[in-house]
Amino acid sequence: MNYFIMKTIKLSLLFLFVSISFISCSSDNNQNQEEPTLIEYREELNVSYGSDNDQKFDIYLPANRTTDTKVLILVHGGGWTSGDKSDMNAFKDIILSDLQDIAVVNINYRLADQNNQPYPMQINDITSVVNHLKVNQSEYVISDTFGFIGTSAGAHLSLLWSYAFDTENDITMVCSIVGPTNFTDPAYLNNTDPALQELIDLYGINPAINYLEEVSPYHQATTTAPPTILFYGGQDPLIPTTQGTAMRDKLQDLGVTHEFTLYPNAGHGWIGLELIDTWQKLKLFTETYL
């Protein structure tokens, strides 16, 4: 646990810079030719992709990137009503350290309240982010290939967007860490746990079954769903284990490439050796499928 914390602290201080270099060489005509300037590491914070104050993202672009440089989009949790992109900084830092050829986009999205339901508002925000990145692809020097890493409510949004709203097949992998997947799960519909019911109420669930299915990644997954990696805690008080195991079984039935890890003694998040295991598996999955 101390090793991981120390590594995270070091990663949070990491900035990559590549100096501009020029190489001169002699041609057959004895003329000096100048090599193209190397592309430097670049980051921009609080880039606006809409008019709302919450519609902002941070982007981290690796040095020497090309139009083949893949992009990971990070989506924070917070029960759809709270949270901030800074909550994903530990993931951002370790990606910049261990996956140095990948661009990172860490997003905020509009938070739900009594006047603004999370769906489809937050899905629309993710669409706006993806469209912004694609429109500015040449400016950023990135590809139009994206992956998602989401935690909790952000994992739900990542799965739902990847399965139901990726109309141009831009997403090549998605990761859910303790994300809700199925609002028709009896563990939700028939629960007697006030804390669990509060989570469901936060999402503003319409009791109509077709709505429950519309907002459930479990019901939106098809055979064309991107490779998916899932992490869940066996003692999570907010996300029943069946949210993970049922999603796993659905992906298995559909023939979708997937991995599933259940930490039996973990809750709604974990630290130490389990967190190190999560990153090791997620890193390999990202290297393989992004």
Image (spheres, rainbow, N blue to C red):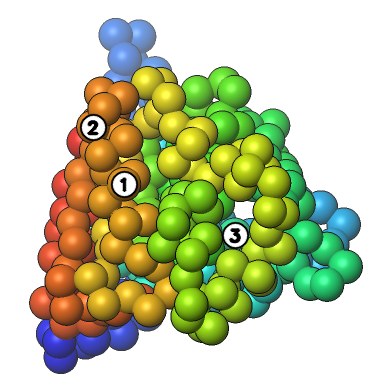
Q: Nearer the viewer, residue 105 or 60?
A: 105
Tell me if I can see residue 198 in this picture. yes
Q: Earlier in the sequence, mark 2 or mark 1?
A: 1
Q: Is residue 145 above or below residue 83?
A: above
Image location of residue 109, percent across then percent down: 68, 61
Q: Amino acid at mark 2?
A: Gln
Element type at mark 2? helix
Q: Amino acid at mark 3?
A: Ile
* Residue at 48 percent of width and 77 percent of height: 192
Q: Please name the residue shown 23% across and 86% down the image.
A: 5
| Sooner in the amino-acid sequence: mark 1 or mark 3 | 3
Which of pointers 2 and 3 lies earlier in the amino acid sequence? 3
Instruction: Estimate how packed mark 3 is, as few (under 14), some (14 to 19) or many (20 or more) residues with alpha carbons within 10 Å.
Output: many
**Is residue 52 shown left or right of residue 218?**
right
Q: Which residue is mark 3?
A: 107
Q: Are marks 2 and 3 in contact (CB under 8 Å)?
A: no
Measured from the top left, where is residue 284 in percent x and y? 17, 47
The residue at which mark 1 appears reads as: 246
Residue at image location 15% in from the left, 87% down from the top: 1
Amino acid carrying mark 1 in the image: Ala
In this rendering, which labeled residue sits more in front, label 2 or label 1?
1
Q: Nearer the viewer, residue 133 or 261?
A: 261
Q: Residue at x 71, y 63 (%)?
A: 204
Q: Residue 132 occupies which quadrant of the picture?
A: top right
Report how far apart the C-alphas of labels 2 and 3 lie in the structure.
Answer: 30 Å
Give the crowd class for mark 2: few <14, some 14-19, many >=20 residues within 10 Å: some
Extreme residue in the top direction: 28
Q: Provide residue 195's location: percent of width, then percent of height.
A: 51, 83
> Toward which corner of the image does residue 64 lie, by quadrant?
top left
Which residue is disc 2 drawn over?
Answer: 252
Q: Are marks 1 and 3 in contact (CB under 8 Å)?
A: no
